[in-house]
Amino acid sequence: MAETVWSTDIGEAVYRSRDPVRNLRLRVHLQRITSSNFFHYQPAAELWKDLIDLATFRPQPTASGHRPEEDEEEEIVIGWQEKLFSQFEVDLYQNEAACQSPLDYQYRQEILKLENSGGKKNQRIFTYTDSDRYTNLEEHCQRMTTAASEVPSFLVERMANVRRRRQDRRGMEGGILKSRIVTWEPSEEFVRSNHVINTPLQTMHIMADLGPYKKLGYKKYEHVLCTLKVDGNGVITVKPDFTGLKGPYRIEMEGEKQELWKYTIDNVSPLAQPEEEERERRVFKDLYGRHKEYLSSLIGTDFEMTVPGALRLFVNGEVVSAQGYEYDNLYVHFFVELPTTHWSSPAFQRLSGVTQTCTTKSLGMDKVAHFSYPFTFEAFFLHEDESSDALPEWPVLYCEVLSLDFWQRYRVEGYGAVVLPATPGSHTLTVSTWRPVELGMVAELRRFFIGGSLELEDLSYVRIPGSFKGERLSRFGLRTETTGTVTFRLHCLQQSRAFMESSSLRKRMRSVLDRLEGFSQQSSVHNVLEAFRRARRRMQEARESLPQDLVSPSGTLVS
């Protein structure tokens, strides 16, 4: 005979089910392994006095004809919250004086009906449902650890007193709140008293009476075989887990006999019938359909499209940071300039903004001000002239960095500009800035003590202003100084009907976008050339400020 492999894992297992818990069915099999009856045998026949007949090991029937082996093995299928009475409860509730609550009287009536119909079907296996007093006592006396000298904490005591199992309790709709929703200054006692979880929960215990034969009904022989807990979210907790392919669980009794019992727990819930699955599928489909209609009613069914031949530009931007500036308490004023031809924006659209004032933080050798200031805008490009000679322009983002002193006086720290990306997607742009300067120490002292400095009347003068119509823009005599940088993060989206229409329209729009991108690259080259011109101008100014004996006739420094 093969040796029995016992299951030693008695921890709990957690399952989630969308089906109603009332469909849960468990099969519990209980069997005694060792019994005192095994060692009581009678002498063999006279013909074989020195041998023991194996038949003598078979337990003998009692006077009533009942064989003890019928009491040593039992198997029963139990449903969720199905009440199976123990022998102790049968003896107790037959006495009407022991009934105290309406539930006790209900159990008495059920037991009397069972007695009239031939008695209860179960012998040793019985259950305690969610309404029984054993469940309340078990929740109150549960232990958090395996230590014999465990002292329950304040939280354990509070959790034991919480009645968490009633799922049918609902608050009164339209009731008036009797307490504040938010407590801004909670006391320590308030925090301790409210640190309790109150999840709706139902409990059921599957028990076994492991007392000797004809001595059933004693509390000391009751043992818990399995504990089931189900909450309102469909989470089922089983302790110990279903047996499945594992070995049976064992219970070893204490005392002189030290009887050994084994039991298994299997999930035998019936599978859903095809018609039930189809009905459930239709219900879920209808539910999801109604939810989709509700979401559609919130969003709207009409998708806004652009007019034919137009390109819609969405920009969700962020002023990330500024660094490398002389003074602290920085803020950024920015705006978007749309080209005068082909571009437009809604009347309600704001194309400018001002960030909050931010103090700088040392990051390496630089001082950085982190703004994280979001902004958004949209614009429309309507390309009417389809000739290849027309070079469309792209919007430009201008920025002005200023600083505040202790007396709330501001000073200009730098100007900058960058062409918006012509391709959709996420872009991180770093804008270099400069500011006008005056020669001499007096201007710098005035800037430090009383604030104020040279400013541009038109910020678009940072690049070529859109209103400029001449052939050459002269900046002769403008002295500047390179300052810090401003970082922008832009998320650009483009929408046009040409993207989803015929190939000719897509090619036409593609050519427009290519030319726009070429304009953007042309603008980038222009910015590089301007930077070289400013650097060359500063070098020329530096040479002019040096004594003439240190400069050679060719303009280079004399070593």
Image: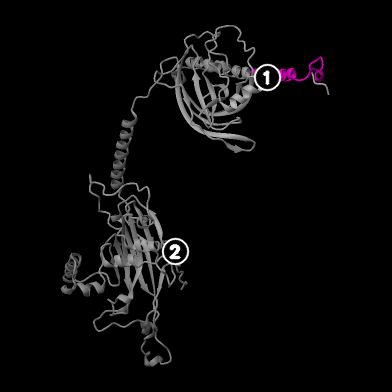
Q: Quadrant of residue 95?
A: bottom left
* Amino acid type for the residue under numbered disc 1: Phe
Q: Please say if 248 is above or below 17.
A: below
Q: Which residues are magenta?
A: 528-555
Q: Where does the image place residue 89, in percent across and percent down from the top left? A: 24, 72
User: How many labels were placed on the picture?
Assistant: 2
* Amino acid type for the residue under numbered disc 2: Lys
Q: Please say if 233 is above or below 359.
A: below
* Residue at the far right in the pictured view: 559
Colouring of the image: one colour
Crowd rating for badge 2 (residues with CA inside 10 Å; few <14, some 14–19, many 20+):
some
Q: Which residue is mark 2?
A: 246
Q: Where does the image place residue 429, in percent across and percent down from the top left? A: 57, 27
Q: Which mark is residue 532?
A: 1
Which of 79 and 443 lies nearest the eye of the viewer? 443
Q: Quadrant of residue 294?
A: top left
Q: Residue at x 46, y 73 (%)?
A: 1
Q: Secondary structure at mark 1?
A: helix
Dot placed on the residue nearer the N-terminal end, 1 or 2:
2
